[in-house]
Image (cartoon, rainbow, N blue to C red):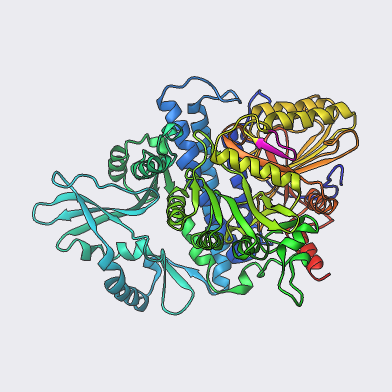
Amino acid sequence: MTLTPSFRGADVVAQVGGWDHNDTNVLNRELSWLAFNARVLQLSSDTEVPLLEQIRYLAIFSSNLDEFFQVRVSGLQDQQAAGISTPASDGRLPAEQLALVRDIVIDLVAEQERVLVHEIMPALRKQGIELSAWHDLDGDDQVGLSEQFRDHIFPVLTPLAVDPGHPFPYVSDLSLNLAVVVCDPRDERKLFARVKVPNTLPRWLRIGDADRFVPLEEVVAAHLDQLFPGMEVEEHHAFRVTRNADLSDALDEADDLLSAVEFELRRRRFGRATRLEVDASMTDEVLDLLIGEFDLDPSAVYVARTPLDPTSFNEIADIERPALLWPEWKGVIDPRLQPDDEPLDIFAEIRAGDVLVQHPYESFSRSVVEFIHQAASDPDVLAIKITLYRTASSSPIVDACIKAAERGKQVTVLVELKARFDEAANIGWARRLEQAGVHVAYGLLGLKIHTKIAMAVRKEPDGIRRYCHIGTGNYNHRTARIYEDIGILTADPEIGADVADLFNHLTGYGREIRYSKLLVAPDQLRPAFEALIDNEIASGRGRMILKMNSLVDVQMTEKLYEASQAGVDIDLIIRGQCSLKPGISGLSDRIRVRSIIGRYLEHSRIYHFANGNGPGESATYIGSADLMSRNLNRRVEALVRLDDPRTQQRVHEILDVVLNDDRLAWTLASDGVWTKRSGPAAVDTHARLQQLARGRANG
């Protein structure tokens, strides 16, 4: 594999970050996350990206930011309110981090607004797509929308007055609202009301038959006189509140986890406000009222000069304009999983050797889903076991598990109820599975089950055989179209025994379980990983390539510094947060960090050690764990060692492509600056892996 990726002769395309000035050996995780989201935002102004995909990246940037405030910022605010004086690993107190976050977010949102107004909207107009304001519409357009308001919008609106007889209404998390001030002409009293903009209607209303759109809240605002008859509407302003959405730590000690999660979901609706977004037109009087009602500090207010909630731009990105979207990609079928004249016997193929699949380049439905489907239908399959962390609203995997149970097979599903923002959906799946006779378990107190494993136990002429899937991504056929993940289908007896032991541990009791080819968190993964790094240090010619979503565990960061100082060459491929500072002389000068941001979300975890099986004998692992404290200490994770030469070669090919990318790749400097360059090799990871997958499928 490539030893040292290079950008020789490359031109700088963009730079983000560089906000984190501290004297420690680590970068702040919150600022590192903001640098990741800045890399996402850059795609919205990249003219190599199809136009409607550019506006989709504005939506993705905002959706990411919403979750950041719901979880990370709310956590910092809780620490500040509790008077916590212990600094983070970078030396900053919560108040210092909150101040920096605010400054950076203001700058990033300003850039988002600039890109929208000065780049994307003009480009859309050239394509006949217009995002209009109500006051820019002609009379005919307004009349048509007024009819639409009367027939379809007015019936679902509910104006809520605020006065001594009507307390300030509850405002739900991330909902869009209008703050309205009316005057009663009888006594000239000014009165305040809130109108929720219904999320059951499209946010962007089409004007006539053309691709012209106006925001729903502007149409509502233009007809407020119909909601407040006899009143004079003096002012109206859009606002949006973000609430703390993290679940309570009390779940870790709950006697009935299902009931406790249901209670916490009800409590979440009333979580403390963490951010207030307001339209730039809002008067100080109305703003002060909202700040007081939501019990917020003025520093939690963010002023918008373009329509609030840009996540709604997904509606615009979904317009039927194929020429303005990514070319359609349907995952190919792995040659070994393509049926010939006879129907595919997936178990025979897996017995012949491990099958490695990479999504979305290879079809998730025709590999992983097919595996579970055939296991459910095969009369020789006695049992199916699987973990579910996040799955789709209509899941063929869940359907197959139910069908298997109805056919009398032993089916066990471990459902993680605490998967953030999927808790309610997972409760629904758990109940449906239980009603079908599936054995449903909710895991271990204090730990999230994050590992992605499935097993089918099959009766065969030579005895019982276990078939397993171990992957890096969720069992979700929808996200598998946009998340890059890898997994193996294997009948390796040692892996089968390991997976069986892990399932038994998760549904029963057990300690000090020894695994042959799995590294399992929280008990074994950290020490095993450190031992693998020690092997590279001891070899005298160490080499590591580590691909993950995030690296923020300080202990692991320090271990990588130790390896660099011992002469180990290290390439880190990190999509999101990275607390490590690369390229510091005497500390991390042998560590390089890059990030791939593009059409697909890089989600796979691959860990390659040149001496992992002994001097000169490499070892490569894939699995669910990032190098974060939560993954190593508070989650059930599993990495599997790849021993089949064909799967090893495939993974090494993936790493080679990523390390030679000079189109989507960003590189990190020690000062926290991420730089994107365009080089002469013109290697786009996602395009190249599509090409390789197509070549394999075509023989």
Indicate the position of residue 198 as horizontal and vertical percent values. 34, 60
Question: Is residue 442 placed above or below 78 in the rendered structure?
Answer: below
Q: Residue at x 68, y 39 (%)?
A: 673
Give the extent of the magenta segment. Answer: 514-520
x and y, in percent, of residue 474 in the image:
59, 52
Give whichever of 386, 604 is nearer the camera: 386
Seen from the viewer's position, the closer of residues 198 and 131 is 198
Q: Is residue 585 above or below residue 688?
A: above
Is residue 606 visible in the rendered structure shown here? no
Q: Give the percent coordinates (x, y) of residue 208.
A: 41, 78
Q: Check if residue 515 falls in the magenta segment.
A: yes
Where on the picture, by quarter, is residue 532? top right
Name the side, left or right, on which 696 lies relative to 556.
Answer: right
Q: Quadrant of the C terminus?
A: bottom right
**Left or right: 122 in relation to 571:** left
Rendering quarter of residue 16? top right
Residue at point 28%, 45% (across, down): 286
- The answer to which quarter of the image holds residue 357 is bottom right
Report the residue at 72% width, 53% height from top.
463
Q: Is 88 positioned to the left or the right of 81 in the image?
A: right
Q: Residue furthest top?
A: 85
Residue 550 at x, y = what percent? Answer: 64, 40
